[in-house]
Image: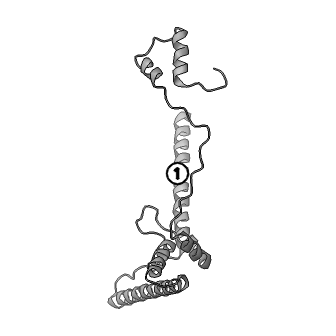
């Protein structure tokens, strides 16, 4: 075949002329309406920009550690930066300036974090008093990542061990 690509119709036409294949039933119809050519230049896809993107960017600029906060991609709960920006936009629609809305949302998020911490402490104390199992504390980002790495390493070792054991069994059986 030559160095350039030919379309399907011209390839089939060559095969028919050479007597390699019989003329297919679809060939006449395909000749009347040939397939569209492939575009030589593909336009660059425009980047999707959402109204909250500048607010998300400014959130990450003020809180760079938030970039490393894990979140589940299959979850319906958006990342904290996006939730922060949505709440800030909501306040801006109510008449707050961008700076006032940002400060207000930061206060709300801090208050929510404090409230969650108090709830955890109350559950923990209640469990201790009643002699029940203490609820696990919320893990830090680093602890979550380390736990995930530990699971991956253990799984890798397990698979590697299985491969070696299987290989050893095969060697033992062939040597008998």
Q: Residue 8 placed where, x, y %?
A: 52, 24
Rendered image quadrant of residue 74: bottom left
| Residue situated in front as seen by the camera: 58 or 144 | 58
Figure check: 23 above or below 33:
above
Figure check: 54 above or below 4:
below
Name, please, the residue furthest toward the right: 3
Q: Residue 168 placed where, x, y %?
A: 55, 43
Q: Residue at x 50, y 75 (%)?
A: 85
| Residue situated in front as seen by the camera: 126 or 47 | 47
Rendered image quadrant of residue 127: bottom left
Name, please, the residue furthest toward the left: 130
- Give the class, few, some or many, for how many residues have Cα within 10 Å of label 1's Cα (few <14, many ≥20): few
Residue designated by label 1: 159
Q: Is residue 176 visible?
A: no
**For the N terminus, which image quadrant?**
top right
Task: State how the image is colored.
Answer: one colour
| Residue situated in front as seen by the camera: 23 or 79 | 23
Q: Residue 4 placed where, x, y %?
A: 65, 26
Q: Is residue 131 left or right of residue 110?
A: left
Figure check: 79 above or below 48:
below
Q: Residue at x 59, y 43 (%)?
A: 42
| Residue situated in front as seen by the camera: 1 or 102 | 102
């Amino acid at each position: 075949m030559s160095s350039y690509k030919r379309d399907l119709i011209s390839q089939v036409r060559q095969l028919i002329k050479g007597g390699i294949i019989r003329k297919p039933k679809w060939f006449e119809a395909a000749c009347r309406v040939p397939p569209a050519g492939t575009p030589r230049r593909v336009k660059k896809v425009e980047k999707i920009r959402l109204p909250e993107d500048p607010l998300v960017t400014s959130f990450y600029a003020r809180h760079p550690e938030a970039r490393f906060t894990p979140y589940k991609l299959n979850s319906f709960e958006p990342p904290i930066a996006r939730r922060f920006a949505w709440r800030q936009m909501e306040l801006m629609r109510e008449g707050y300036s961008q700076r006032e809305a940002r400060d207000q949302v930061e206060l709300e998020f801090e208050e929510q974090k404090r409230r969650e911490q108090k709830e955890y402490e109350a559950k923990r104390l209640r469990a201790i008093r009643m002699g029940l199992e203490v609820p696990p504390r919320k893990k830090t980002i680093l602890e979550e990542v380390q736990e995930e790495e530990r699971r991956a390493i253990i799984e890798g070792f397990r698979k590697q061990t299985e491969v070696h054991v299987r290989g050893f069994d095969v060697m033992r059986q062939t040597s008998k």
